[in-house]
Amino acid sequence: MAAPGGNGVPLATRLYKSRVLGLALGFVCVLFGMYPLDPSAFVWALMLVNAFVWPHVAFQLSLRAVHTLRSERRNLLLDSFCGGFWVGAMHFNPLPSVTILSMMTMNNVAIGGPRFMCAGWIAQGLGVFAALLVFAPAFVAVTTQAQLYGCLPILMLYPLALGWICYRQARTLARHKRELLALSRTDSLSGLLNHGAWKDHLEIEFQRCRREQQGAVIALIDIDHFKLINDTYGHVTGDIVLRQLGKVLRQNLRITDLAGRYGGDEFCIIMPGMPLNRATDVMDTLRDRFNALVYDQDPTLRASLSIGLAPYQAEHADCTRWLNDADLALYEAKSGGRNRVSCVQGSWLRSV
């Protein structure tokens, strides 16, 4: 018996471990069911091969298969066939038979859902039919106390093992989901929030400011003459400049500040609870550090920042009006000579 997993070698490894455990426990159950029937040496040998040789053979077959999942599904159907065979060989002894069939069914539905569960039932039925051809048809109606105890290990340990595997799979899937969500909201070049994610945070911050009557400042940052940098030094250098700005933003902002890449060479920041004068100082420091970082990397490269700041104001009808104020301030910084910080408040602009 085996347990669910993903495709590839990790799947084969997980199923190998659970098959080794499941078939060893199943061997104990079948052993107690078959012993009173005094089977031949051949049947004992077949039981040993199924329980202790087949798991290793199945693992090697899966490792060598082009499609691991397809190979493991075939292996699981063979497991089901063997389970049905041993049920028929035990003459349908109630408790051992139900134990074997239910563990197989639980295993199949875990890895393949209802459709594969039905395929497993068909395989079990074929196994029972094969057993009826080999052994004289009979029915053992009573389960002895020894057979009951022989079924307890698989009834107790295998569901625990399967549950643990499913739990670990669920945790892995949850982690992958978080990672994919983070990737979907992150700009791959700068490592900051992408445009859509930053706009979502802007709306949240706008509603928070309106609800709690608290202040915040947003900043729009533009790399001066970025097209000229790309044309002169190449797009690889342009990408390096973008990464450097992302690095400067991550190193010089608070944990609560939200920085993103708005698009192209334009970046954006939300600074909750920060006064405008303090935001101006922070942006001036950030501008100087960016200039120094780029110069240290390549003294021939001239890169500077124009920055527009806009504080939240109660008269803003929505976050778009707030963002438009920052855009006006950025335009003022660029038209005023670039490499500077401009602030907008109400109907006036100020450049630093």
Image (spheres, rainbow, N blue to C red):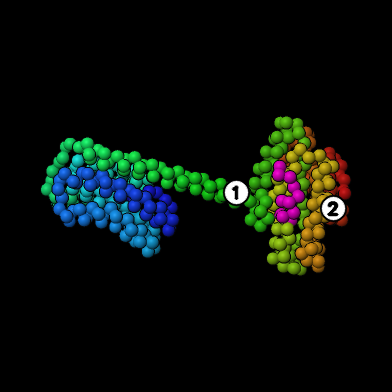
Q: Nearest the camera: 2 or 266?
A: 2
Percent x, y of residue 133: 14, 52
Please report the residue visible at 73 percent of the width from the left and 51 percent of the height from the top. 251
**Tag 1: residue type?**
Ala
Q: Does the magenta stretch include residue 25?
A: no
Name the residue beneath numbered marker 1: 182
Which badge, 1 or 2, comes first in the chain's sequence?
1
Label 1 vs label 2, nearer the camera: 1
Q: Give the range drawn in magenta.
A: 245-256
Element type where label 2 sits in the image: loop
Which labelled disc corresponds to residue 340? 2
User: Is residue 119 visible in this depiction of the protein?
Assistant: no
Main SS, magenta residues: helix
Q: Nearest the camera: 115 or 153?
A: 153
**Tag 2: residue type?**
Arg
Q: Nearest the camera: 305 or 61?
A: 61
Q: In this view, does 317 lie to the left or right of 48?
A: right
Q: In this view, does 231 lie to the left or right of 32?
A: right
Q: What is the residue that sits farthest to the left in this orientation? A: 136
Q: Distance between the residues labelled 1 and 2?
A: 33 Å
* Quadrant hosting residue 208: top right
Q: In this view, does 45 lie to the left or right of 209?
A: left
Percent x, y of residue 186: 63, 51
Crowding at mark 2 (Cα within 10 Å: few <14, some 14-19, many 20+): many
106 lies above or below 244:
above
Q: Is residue 254 magenta?
A: yes
Crowding at mark 1 (Cα within 10 Å: few <14, some 14-19, many 20+): few
Please report the residue visible at 30 percent of the width from the left and 47 percent of the height from the top. 25
Which labelled disc corresponds to residue 347? none
Percent x, y of residue 229: 76, 64
Q: In this view, does 70 lie to the left or right of 309?
A: left
